[in-house]
Image: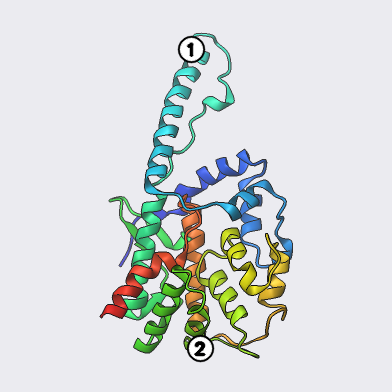
């Protein structure tokens, strides 16, 4: 089908530019840092990057309040700007320029997670690359999804194993996570449950989110408030164990989870847990 619309990123970038400038950087620089594939190149001292890494979940009510606040600010700005130009014959203050009113990011993020959870568990066929360029805002207000070129099929057994893994992660059932991850096909040299627990959370929860990392710290044996470089040594550097097998369907699922989490952040929904957001569809699959 032909979908009319524009990539949702075009609606997001203006607000991201405001966010970046408020933290003393540019959107281009922030985007370059966040899309870096090499963690050694990430500037962790950048205030905007630190804010992004520590950002929690944003509710729909918070998003609505933000939109109302921006609309009120823009209204005042137009009045002040009009008075400055029309009455005082001076240049309007910089702050009087209107800034974009954001989309209801939390609502759209939840919808996208619901759709992909349905694909994963009910259809057994999902798109692993739902980034912001592949999501269109259509004229009628619906979201259009394009570019289903990186799809993965899942067997019923794989779906059941993935459902149990995601539910264990979402429920913070740390004893159940390693065996559930192994049942999905993950293997390490010594089958160290600490590596399985840590990897599962980083890949399918919220990435290297400080709360999750500090909660897992005593069980994994990591430093408190671990930095990205040190964390990478625990994940891939052999500090705990060596990865031997990470099956293709898990690679595609991890890609999907991480991209959805990043898209939610771009939409203004904050840092969402992919496991938590996919849990309802996982539970529905197990009930069936």
Tell me the residue at 45%/48% (across/down).
11
Which residue in the protein does label 1 denote?
86
Q: Nearer the viewer, mark 1 or mark 2?
A: 2
Residue 188 % position (x, y): 62, 88
Looking at the image, is 162 positioned above or below residue 57? below
Where disc 2 sits, the SS reads: loop
Q: Which mark is residue 287?
A: none
Q: Residue 171 appears at what percent x and percent y?
A: 44, 69
Q: List the residue tagged with mark 2.
A: 185
Residue toward you, 197 or 112: 197
Return the residue nearer the eye: 14 or 63. 63
Number of callouts in the render?
2
Q: Residue furthest left?
A: 288
Q: Position of residue 268 (x, y in %)?
A: 47, 49
The quadrant of the rendering that contains the N terminus is: bottom left
Location of residue 210 by image quarter: bottom right
């Amino acid at each position: 089908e032909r979908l009319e619309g524009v990539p949702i990123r075009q609606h997001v970038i203006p607000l991201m530019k405001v966010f970046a400038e408020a933290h003393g950087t540019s959107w281009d620089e922030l985007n370059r840092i966040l899309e870096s594939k090499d963690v050694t190149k990430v500037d962790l001292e950048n205030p905007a990057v630190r804010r992004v890494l520590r950002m929690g979940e944003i509710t729909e009510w918070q998003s609505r309040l933000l939109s109302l606040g921006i609309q009120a600010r823009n209204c005042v700005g137009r009045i002040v700007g009009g008075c400055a130009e029309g009455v005082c014959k001076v240049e309007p203050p910089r702050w009087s320029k209107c800034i974009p009113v954001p989309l209801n990011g939390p609502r759209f993020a939840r919808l996208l997670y619901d759709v992909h959870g349905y694909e994963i568990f009910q259809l057994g066929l999902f798109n692993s690359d739902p980034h912001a360029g592949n999501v269109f805002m259509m004229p009628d207000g619906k979201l259009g999804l394009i570019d289903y070129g990186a799809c993965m099929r899942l067997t019923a057994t794989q779906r059941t194993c993935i459902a149990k893994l995601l539910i264990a992660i979402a429920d913070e059932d740390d004893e159940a996570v390693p065996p559930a991850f192994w049942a999905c096909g993950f293997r390490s040299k010594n089958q160290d449950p600490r590596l399985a627990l840590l990897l599962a959370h980083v890949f399918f929860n919220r990435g290297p989110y400080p709360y999750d990392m500090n909660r897992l710290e005593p069980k994994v044996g990591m430093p408190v408030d671990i930095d990205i470089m040190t964390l990478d040594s625990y994940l891939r550097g052999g500090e705990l164990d060596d990865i031997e097998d990470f099956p293709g369907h898990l690679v595609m699922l991890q890609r999907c989870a991480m991209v959805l989490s990043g898209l939610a952040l771009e939409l203004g929904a904050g840092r969402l847990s992919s496991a938590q957001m996919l849990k309802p569809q996982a539970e529905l699959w197990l009930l069936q």
